[in-house]
C-alpha cells in the first residue's frame, strides 16, 4: 500500500472543530448523518436499522440507506467489502440521504477506507474505530491498521479507537457477533436516544429467539452506552418532533410489494434481477396469505408473457424487473399495447447500459419506458418519487391499467429500493381493491374493440364471458379483432390506442410547484431525486434565492399546465441521474449536445429552452450538490428562456 | 390463488353444440396442409366433449400453425413468436376453470420458444399442447427448422441442413415432471383424433407432436411414410390407443406399448423410421403447478385488508406520544 494513496481521492483537509472538554456538553444538532460499517455478516446492518427505528420512534426524521458490497461474500477486511447502513437523523422530516457523513462506526479500518475514498465522509468526521487490529497477531494487519490510523488522523478526521470486541467479550463468547449492539448502545448515548426504546427494539428484532438472547443483547447495548458515557467527551441531541399518527418504516421495494397487496392484484410474475428482486422476496412471503401468487418464471420474457396471460384472463397482473429485464420484455409489452391488455410493469432502475451497475442507482430508463417496444406503442409511464409513492403508485397503476386497458410502467430505482423512511401508516381504503371485472354475458353483436371515438376506450372482454368469443391478436386488427391489413383499419386502431393517453391526461391535475409560483429558476425533476431537489430549493429560498422546483409523477402522459408553469420562470432546468453531454467539453455544442431524458422530453413537447444537469455516479444526487448546481445556473446571466 | 365465487357456479341446464359452433372463418392454410387435419380433429373433439366455447381458449404463437385460434369460434390468443406457453400458463393460473389448448409450430416451440417448452413440461399445468411439426418454417418461406432432417435444402441451407434434427419427443420425455407425451401423424386422422382426445382428458400438460405435411415447401418429404404403412409403428395398449379392425388391416406394424413405461417410451420415441404413433407416456400422478399454488379460501376485500394490516403492524413505529393509548404493536 502506497503511503500517499490510502485516502485517495485527495480532499481538502479542514482542521477539526475543537472537542468539548471537561464536563460533557450536549450539542444540539438539527441533523446528523451516521454510518455503521463492517465486513459482511458482522451485523452493522442490524445496528444501523435499529438506530433508525429508535430515532423514528422518538419522532426524529430518518432516512436510512443500505451500504451493500457488490459481492455476496467479499473477503474480510477489504476496501470494497463495506456492508452496513447510513442513517440520516433530523429534527424535521427527512426526504433523502443528505450530504456527507458526520460520524462513522467502523469495525475495521479497511471498510472505512472504502468510504473515505468514495468521498462520503465530511472533513473532520468523527470515526469510532475498532482498535483490536492495532495489536493483531498478523504483523501485516497491525501495520496496515496503524498506517491507516495515522493517515486518517493526519487528514483531520477525529478518530477514536475503541476496543469494542474486548468490551463485548465479558458478555458474549462470540464477541465479533455482539459488537453491533454494543455500537448501538454507544450511538444511543452519543445522540441522547431513549434507551428504553432501544431495549424495546432489541426485543422486537430478537423476539423470535429466546429470552436469553434478548437479555444478552440488551446487556451489550447497555455496556456500549456506559462505555461511551465514561470514555467519550462529546454528546449530541437532535430534537424530535413527535408525530401524532403511526408511521411505517419500510424500504422502497417493500413499499412496492405492500402496494401490490393493497391494489388487489393477485398475480405477480417475475424473474430474479437486482435490485428489483427484494420486492418479490417480500411479496413471496406474504402474498399467498391474501390469495395471491408470485410466479418465478423461467426468464424475463416468460414472466411478462405469463403476466399478460393472467391479465387477459381477467386478473390484472404485475411483473417486476430492472433495466436488462425490462429490455427483454419489450416485445411482450408491445403485444399488451396492441391487444389492449391491462398490465403493470415495475422497473427498479439500476446503472446501465448492459449489466452496468446492478446495485447502484440511476435514472437511465425513462426514454426506454416511454418509447420502448417497436412501432407506435403508447403506454403510461409513472415514476415513484418517494418511498411512500412506491406504495401508492401500485394502486394507481392498477386502476389506470384496468380503466384504460393499457400498459402502465412504474419506475423506481436502486436508491429508493434500499432506502428506508417513515411515512404515515396507510389507512385501508376499500376502493384500493378494484372490484372484480364485469363478466356478465355480452349482448349479441358486441365488439371486442368497440373504440369510443372521442377517447379510444373500449370494453374489455374476458375469457369465460359468453358472447365475447374472439381471437385476440398481435396482428393489426379491426374492431372485431379480425386481422386487418387495410389502411383504414390500421390507422383507426393506432388512433384509438393513442387517444387513450390523451383521455388519461384530461384526468390529471397540474402538479404543485414547490416554492414560489414564479421566479428566476425552475428545477424540474422526476423519480427519487425529489427529496434532495426540494431540500436544496428550500435551503436556497431561505437565503432569498428565487428558485422553485416541480416534480413530475406522470411522465407519459404529462400533466396539463406544465408549459404555463415553466413560462413563469426566467430559466428552467432538469436535474437527473442520466447522462447529458457537458457543454464545457470541447466538441459539444447546441447541435450535438445530448440532453438528459426529461429535459429532452420537455424541450420537444413544450418548445421551452430547458437546460439540464446530471450526474451518473451510482449514488443518489446529494442536496449539497444540487445547491451548487442551482447557484451556478443562477449565476450565469447570459442564459434565459426566450 | 383462489377463485371468484362466480367461477364456481354450475349451469343447471344442458347445452349441446354442433361442429359449426366451433368453426370460424375459412382457413387460409394451403390445400393439403396438415394444419387442416388438426383443425378438423380439434373441432370434432370440442363438439364431442360439448366444450362451452366461452370457456375454451386456444393460445398460439407465430407461424402457419399459430393461425389456428382464428378458425375456432372460442376465445383465442394469437400472441408473439415462441411465447404461447407462458401466455397459456398465465391464463390457466388466473382461470383454472378454462379449457386451455396451445397450438405451436416446430420453430415456435423448439427454437425461439425452447426455454418455455422445457419449463412448461416441468410446471405441468393442465392444458393440451399440440406441436404442429412440419419440419420447416412455412410462413417466412422455407427456412430450416430445428426438426428439419439433416441435409434438407432450404433458403437458409441451400447446400443442405448441417445438423441432425432435434427430436421433440425425446427432449420432452427427458424433462422432470413430464406427464403425457404422444405422437400423431396427419395422414392417420382416426388415430390423431384418439390421441388428442386422450391428451385432452389427461390432467396435466399433454404434449402431442403431430408430424404434418407441408405441401408448399416440402411436398415430397414424408411421401415414403405415406405410401408405406410398414414405416409407421402403431403403439397400442388397453390403457392407451386401441386400433380399429379396419386400420389394423392396413397398419400391420404394431407394438403393445405400456404408456406408464418411461424408459421404453424414451427408447421408442427416438425412432423416425418407422415412426412411432400413439401415446408414448402418461403419468396422471404428476402434480399440476396451478394446484400447487392454489391457496384455500375465497379471496375477499376483508381478507386483503386483514393481511395488509398485519403487514403494516410489523413495520409500524408508534411515536411515543401516540403510543400511549394506542393498540400494542
Image (spheres, coloured by chain):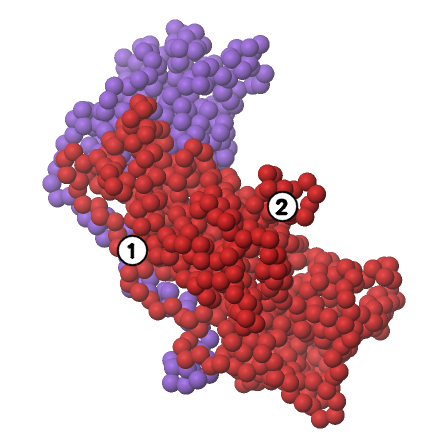
Chain colours: A red, B purple
Residue assigned mark 2: A581
Residue B30 vertical position relative to residue A30 in the rendered view, above or below: above
User: Along the polypeptide, which appears first: circle 2 or circle 1?
Assistant: 1
Which corner quadrant of the image does residue A508 belong to? bottom left
**Residue B296, image x, y percentages:** 32, 56
- Graded by Cα atoms within 10 Å as few (under 14), some (14 to 19) or many (20 or more), the crowding at tag 2 reads some
Depth check, front residue: B33 or A477: A477
- Give the mark toward the camera: 2 or 1: 2
Q: Chain of mark 2?
A: A
- Relative to A161, B268 lies left or right: left
* Residue A79 seen by the camera: yes
- Graded by Cα atoms within 10 Å as few (under 14), some (14 to 19) or many (20 or more), the crowding at tag 1 reads some
- At x 55%, y 67%, the residue is A545
Residue found at the far left of this picture: B13
Q: Quadrant of the C terminus of chain B?
A: bottom left
Is the same chain shared between marks 2 and 1?
yes
* Residue B96 seen by the camera: no
Which corner quadrant of the image does residue B141 belong to? top left
Residue B224 vertical position relative to residue A41 in the rendered view, above or below: above
Depth check, front residue: A322 or B206: A322
CB under 8 Å between callouts 2 and 1?
no
Depth check, front residue: B100 or A323: A323
**Residue A180, image x, y percentages:** 65, 74
Q: Chain of mark 1?
A: A
Determine the secondary structure under disc 1.
Answer: loop
Residue assigned mark 1: A434
Residue A239 vertical position relative to residue B131 in the rendered view, above or below: below
- At x 26%, y 52%, the residue is A436
Determine the secondary structure under disc 2.
Answer: loop
- At x 49%, y 46%, the residue is A603
**Residue A620, image x, y percentages:** 59, 59
Give the CA distance from mark 2 to mark 1: 44 Å
Amino acid at each position: 500500500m502506497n503511503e500517499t494513496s490510502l485516502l485517495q481521492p485527495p480532499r481538502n483537509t479542514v482542521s477539526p472543530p475543537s472537542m468539548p472538554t471537561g464536563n460533557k456538553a450536549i450539542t444540539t444538532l438539527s441533523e446528523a448523518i451516521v454510518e455503521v460499517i463492517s465486513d459482511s455478516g458482522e451485523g452493522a446492518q442490524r445496528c444501523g436499522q435499529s438506530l433508525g427505528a429508535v430515532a423514528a420512534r422518538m419522532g426524529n426524521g430518518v432516512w436510512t440507506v443500505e451500504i451493500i458490497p457488490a459481492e455476496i461474500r467479499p473477503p474480510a477486511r477489504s476496501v470494497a467489502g463495506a456492508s452496513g447502513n447510513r442513517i440520516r437523523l433530523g429534527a424535521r422530516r427527512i426526504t433523502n440521504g443528505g450530504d456527507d457523513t458526520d460520524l462513522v462506526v467502523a469495525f475495521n479500518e479497511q471498510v472505512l477506507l472504502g468510504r473515505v475514498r468514495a468521498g462520503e465522509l465530511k472533513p473532520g468526521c468523527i470515526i469510532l474505530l475498532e482498535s483490536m487490529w492495532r495489536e493483531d497477531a498478523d504483523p501485516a494487519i497491525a501495520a496496515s491498521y496503524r498506517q491507516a490510523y495515522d493517515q486518517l488522523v493526519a487528514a483531520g478526521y477525529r478518530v477514536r479507537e475503541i476496543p469494542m470486541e474486548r468490551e463485548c467479550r465479558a458478555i458474549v463468547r462470540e464477541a465479533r457477533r455482539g459488537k453491533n449492539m454494543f455500537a448501538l448502545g454507544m450511538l444511543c448515548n452519543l445522540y441522547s436516544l431513549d434507551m428504553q426504546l432501544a431495549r424495546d427494539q432489541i426485543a422486537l428484532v430478537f423476539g423470535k429467539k429466546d429470552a436469553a438472547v434478548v437479555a444478552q443483547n440488551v446487556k451489550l447495548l447497555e455496556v456500549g452506552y456506559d462505555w461511551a458515557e465514561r470514555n467519550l467527551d462529546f454528546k449530541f441531541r437532535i430534537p424530535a418532533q413527535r408525530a401524532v399518527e403511526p408511521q411505517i418504516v419500510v424500504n422502497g421495494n417493500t413499499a412496492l410489494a405492500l402496494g401490490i397487496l393493497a391494489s388487489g392484484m393477485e398475480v405477480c410474475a417475475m424473474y430474479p434481477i437486482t435490485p428489483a428482486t427484494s420486492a418479490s422476496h417480500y411479496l413471496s412471503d406474504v402474498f399467498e396469505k391474501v390469495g395471491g401468487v408470485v410466479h418465478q418464471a423461467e426468464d424475463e420474457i416468460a414472466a411478462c408473457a405469463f403476466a399478460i396471460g393472467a391479465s387477459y384472463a381477467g386478473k390484472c397482473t404485475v411483473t417486476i424487473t430492472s433495466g436488462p429485464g425490462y429490455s427483454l420484455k419489450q416485445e411482450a409489452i408491445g403485444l399488451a399495447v396492441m391487444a389492449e391488455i391491462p398490465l403493470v410493469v415495475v422497473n427498479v432502475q439500476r446503472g446501465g447500459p448492459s449489466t452496468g451497475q446492478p446495485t447502484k442507482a440511476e435514472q437511465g430508463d425513462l426514454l426506454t419506458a416511454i418509447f420502448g417496444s417497436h412501432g407506435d406503442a403508447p403506454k403510461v409511464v409513472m415514476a415513484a418519487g418517494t418511498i411512500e409513492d412506491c406504495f401508492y403508485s401500485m394502486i394507481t397503476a392498477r386502476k389506470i391499467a384496468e380503466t384504460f386497458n393499457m400498459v402502465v410502467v412504474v419506475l423506481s430505482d436502486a436508491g429508493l429500493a434500499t432506502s428506508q423512511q417513515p411515512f404515515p401508516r396507510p389507512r385501508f381504503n376499500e376502493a384500493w381493491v378494484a372490484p372484480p371485472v364485469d363478466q356478465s354475458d355480452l349482448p349479441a353483436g358486441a365488439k371486442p374493440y368497440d373504440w369510443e371515438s372521442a377517447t379510444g376506450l373500449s370494453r374489455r372482454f374476458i375469457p369465460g364471458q359468453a358472447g365475447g368469443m374472439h381471437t385476440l391478436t398481435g396482428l393489426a386488427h379491426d374492431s372485431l379483432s379480425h386481422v386487418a391489413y387495410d389502411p383504414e383499419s390500421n390507422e383507426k386502431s393506432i388512433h384509438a390506442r393513442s387517444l387513450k393517453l390523451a383521455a388519461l391526461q384530461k384526468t390529471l391535475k397540474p402538479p404543485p410547484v414547490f416554492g414560489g409560483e414564479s421566479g428566476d429558476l425552475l428545477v424540474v425533476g422526476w423519480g427519487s431525486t425529489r427529496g434532495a431537489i426540494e431540500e436544496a430549493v428550500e435551503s436556497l429560498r431561505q437565503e432569498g434565492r428565487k428558485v422553485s422546483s416541480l416534480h413530475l409523477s406522470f411522465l407519459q402522459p404529462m400533466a396539463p399546465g406544465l408549459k404555463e408553469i415553466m413560462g413563469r420562470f426566467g430559466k428552467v432546468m432538469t436535474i437527473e441521474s442520466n447522462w447529458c453531454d457537458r457543454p464545457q467539453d470541447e466538441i459539444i455544442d447546441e447541435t450535438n449536445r445530448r440532453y438528459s431524458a426529461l429535459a429532452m422530453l420537455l424541450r420537444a413537447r413544450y418548445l421551452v429552452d430547458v437546460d439540464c444537469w446530471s450526474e451518473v455516479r451510482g449514488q443518489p444526487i446529494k442536496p449539497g450538490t444540487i445547491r451548487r448546481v442551482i447557484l451556478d445556473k443562477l449565476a450565469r446571466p447570459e442564459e434565459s428562456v426566450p | 390463488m383462489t377463485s371468484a365465487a362466480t367461477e364456481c357456479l354450475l349451469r343447471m341446464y344442458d347445452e349441446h353444440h354442433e361442429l359449426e359452433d366451433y368453426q370460424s372463418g375459412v382457413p387460409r392454410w394451403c390445400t393439403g396442409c396438415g394444419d387442416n387435419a388438426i383443425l378438423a380433429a380439434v373441432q370434432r373433439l370440442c363438439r364431442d366433449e360439448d366444450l362451452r366455447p366461452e370457456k375454451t381458449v386456444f393460445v398460439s404463437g407465430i407461424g402457419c400453425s399459430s393461425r389456428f385460434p382464428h378458425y375456432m369460434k372460442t376465445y383465442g390468443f394469437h400472441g408473439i413468436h415462441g411465447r404461447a406457453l407462458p401466455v397459456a400458463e398465465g391464463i390457466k393460473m388466473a382461470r383454472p376453470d378454462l379449457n386451455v389448448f396451445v397450438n405451436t409450430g416446430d420453430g415456435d416451440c423448439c427454437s425461439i420458444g425452447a426455454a418455455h417448452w422445457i419449463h412448461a413440461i416441468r410446471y405441468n399445468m393442465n392444458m393440451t399442447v399440440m406441436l404442429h411439426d412440419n419440419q420447416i418454417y412455412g410462413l417466412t418461406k422455407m427456412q430450416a427448422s430445428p426438426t428439419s432432417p439433416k441435409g434438407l435444402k432450404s433458403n437458409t441451407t441451400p447446400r443442405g441442413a448441417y445438423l441432425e434434427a432435434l427430436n421433440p419427443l425425446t427432449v420432452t420425455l427427458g424433462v422432470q415432471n413430464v406427464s403425457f407425451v404422444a405422437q400423431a401423424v396427419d395422414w392417420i386422422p382416426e388415430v390423431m383424433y384418439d390421441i388428442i382426445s386422450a391428451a385432452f382428458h389427461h390432467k396435466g400438460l399433454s404434449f402431442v407432436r403431430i408430424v404434418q405435411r407441408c405441401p408448399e415447401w416440402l411436398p415430397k418429404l414424408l411421401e415414403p411414410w405415406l405410401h408405406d404403412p410398414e414405416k409407421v409403428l402403431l403403439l397400442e395398449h388397453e390403457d392407451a390407443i386401441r386400433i380399429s379392425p379396419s386400420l389394423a388391416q392396413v397398419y400391420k406394424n404394431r407394438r403393445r406399448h405400456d404408456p406408464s413405461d418411461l424408459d421404453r417410451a424414451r427408447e421408442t420415441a427416438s425412432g423416425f423410421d418407422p415412426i412411432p404413433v400413439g401415446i408414448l407416456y402418461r403419468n396422471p400422478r404428476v402434480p399440476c403447478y396451478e394446484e400447487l399454488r392454489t391457496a384455500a379460501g375465497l379471496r375477499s376485500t376483508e381478507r386483503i385488508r386483514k393481511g395488509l394490516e398485519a403487514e403494516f403492524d410489523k413495520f409500524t413505529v408508534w411515536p411515543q406520544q401516540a403510543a400511549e393509548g394506542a393498540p400494542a404493536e
